[in-house]
Image (cartoon, rainbow, N blue to C red):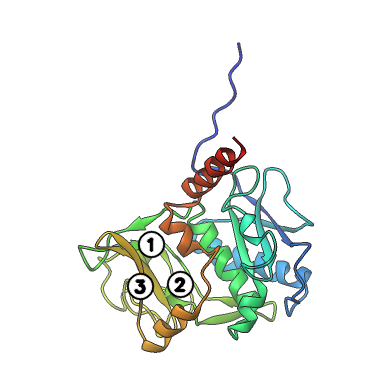
Amino acid sequence: MKTAKPVFGAFNQGIIPTIACFIDKTTTTPLGVSLDALIAAMQAYVTQHVAPVWGTPAKLIKSTGFIKDTWAIVFLDNADQPGALAYHDLTPDGLPLAKVFVRTTINDGELVSVSASHELVEMLVDPAINLMTTGPDPKTIYAYESADPVEALTFNVNGIPMSDFVYPSYFEIFHKAGSVKFDHLNKVKKPFQILSGGYQIVFKNGKWSQVTASAAKKKALKREDKRGHRVETRKEGGALRRTLKSEVARHQKRR
């Protein structure tokens, strides 16, 4: 009797992922940029900027929905949109999925292209939303989020603003201040530094929280709707665990 080839938890080991980018059919808020132009800019962002640093190449394509064996980025109005929270943290094939809430982003005075590239780089670096590391505080565990600490900074790719991101050296406490490059725009001067418009997700005293470098950012985070975002997924134990819990609950309701 033949057995099925095992599928390992590490997504697509050794395979360059294809990422299907699509606007949910019920989304009504304009992106502020054409989807074709945004995908082209994000492809250049990955190929020219992210992959040479993190070793995370990817192929982005436009679609009308999920495609078998591909990762996905879906554009939704907000977490209240009908069906929005029905999107799990994985695609129907069990692969990484990023959600960009368009109306929420625009209402916060931000650009969709920056939010989308933010989600893209973080998905490529930590697709299962479960990577963590030690850092300057021995009693704290730091989430491996590659855009949060510098999220207020942007640079243009194909004329479209993209999110700054930190380098692997950012999470390596042994580096001396100014000794290496810690983020793409070279604004971070030492490991684990949080810039004024950024934040860091940490686990301390048995719970997850967000650390900021400014009072303004702290207030802004309190106002943000985090439903469906990576920070909430991390609280649930990562994408795989959260999706499994959702599926168990769904099947129990059927009984």
x and y percentages locating residue 180 in the rendered image: 35, 72
Left or right of 215, for residue 163: right
x and y percentages locating residue 91 in the rendered image: 63, 49
Residue under pointer 3 = 180
x and y percentages locating residue 4 in the rendered image: 60, 23
Q: Mark 3 or 1 closer to N-term?
A: 1
Which residue is more in the foreground, 50 or 79?
Answer: 79
Which residue is more in the foreground, 192 or 24?
Answer: 24
Q: What element carries label 2?
A: helix
What separation in Å lies between label 3 and label 1 (alpha carbons)? 21 Å
What separation in Å lies between label 1 and label 2 (alpha carbons)? 10 Å
Mark number, residue 143: 1
The amino acid beneath tag 1 is Ala
Q: Is mark 1 on a helix, strand or loop?
A: strand
**Closer mark to the observer between disc 3 and disc 1:** 1
The amino acid beneath tag 2 is Asp
Left or right of 192, for residue 90: right
The residue sitting at 45% across, 78% down in the picture is: 221
Which residue is more in the foreground, 255 or 141?
Answer: 255
The amino acid beneath tag 3 is Val
